Image (cartoon, rainbow, N blue to C red):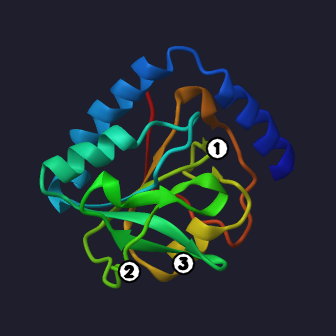
């Protein structure tokens, strides 16, 4: 069932209309989010072409003295590395930009994690790319989790299993 939903919503995401406008709306909601502003510490994925744009968010956070961590795949887990500038990013796992420093974050206290997903359901469960990287990370680390997606990708049910961990909040356009 998840594979069918993954395929369907990847296709829908590729056809999102007014992506730049929607990205701007999500950007504004994120930078004005009370949890984000209170913590000043964010874990944030580096977006792929048809995902909600995070490069502008990363730039904003770096320019405004937030502590920023971005993911890097290491075998079958993701680690988050501190990021000081966009120039530290290089193409890595599956062509995704990853940090090239060895500065791994160990203490996730007070971090907010801006979380990718192909689609989310109304309970905050998500369908990702199927490797479980974020669910494994969330099972071991307490962070406030915010899913980012377009409103067309919020559905009734993603049919979560016992290993799936929901986000605390979803921000859409």
Q: Which of marks 3 and 1 precedes in the sequence?
A: 1
Residue neighbourhood size for the residue with mark 1, other residues' Cα within 10 Å, grouped as few (<14), some (14–19), many (≥20): many
Q: Which residue is mark 2?
A: 102
Q: Which residue is mark 3?
A: 139
**Label 2 vs label 1, nearer the camera:** 2
Q: Vertically, is 10 above or below 161?
A: above
Drawn side of residue 105 relative to residue 166, left or right? left
Residue 143 location in percent, x, y?
A: 37, 69
**Label 3 vs label 2, nearer the camera:** 2
Q: Which mark is residue 52?
A: none
Q: Nearer the viewer, residue 108 or 54?
A: 54
Q: Residue furthest left?
A: 65
Q: Residue at x 42, y 72 (%)?
A: 80
Drawn side of residue 74 relative to residue 61, left or right? right
Q: Secondary structure at mark 3?
A: helix
Q: Residue at x 24, y 52 (%)?
A: 36
Drawn side of residue 120 relative to residue 12, left or right? left
Q: Which residue is mark 1?
A: 118
Q: Quadrant of residue 23?
A: top left
Residue 96 location in percent, x, y?
A: 56, 54
């Amino acid at each position: 069932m998840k594979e069918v939903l993954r395929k369907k919503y990847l296709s829908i995401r590729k056809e999102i209309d007014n992506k730049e406008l929607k990205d701007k709306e999500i950007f504004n909601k994120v930078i004005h989010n009370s949890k984000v502003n209170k913590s000043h510490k964010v874990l944030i994925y580096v977006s792929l072409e048809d995902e909600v744009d995070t490069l502008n968010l990363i730039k904003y956070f770096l320019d405004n003295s937030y502590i920023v961590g971005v993911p890097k795949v290491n075998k079958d887990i993701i680690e988050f590395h501190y990021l000081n500038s966009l120039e530290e990013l290089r193409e890595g796992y599956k062509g995704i930009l990853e940090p090239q420093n060895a500065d791994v974050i160990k203490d996730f206290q007070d971090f907010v994690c801006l979380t990718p997903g192909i689609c989310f359901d109304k309970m905050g469960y998500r369908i990702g790319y199927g490797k479980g990287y974020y669910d494994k990370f969330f099972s071991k680390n307490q962070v406030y989790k915010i899913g980012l997606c377009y409103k067309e990708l919020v559905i009734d049910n993603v049919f979560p299993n016992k290993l799936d961990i929901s986000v605390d909040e979803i921000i859409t356009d």
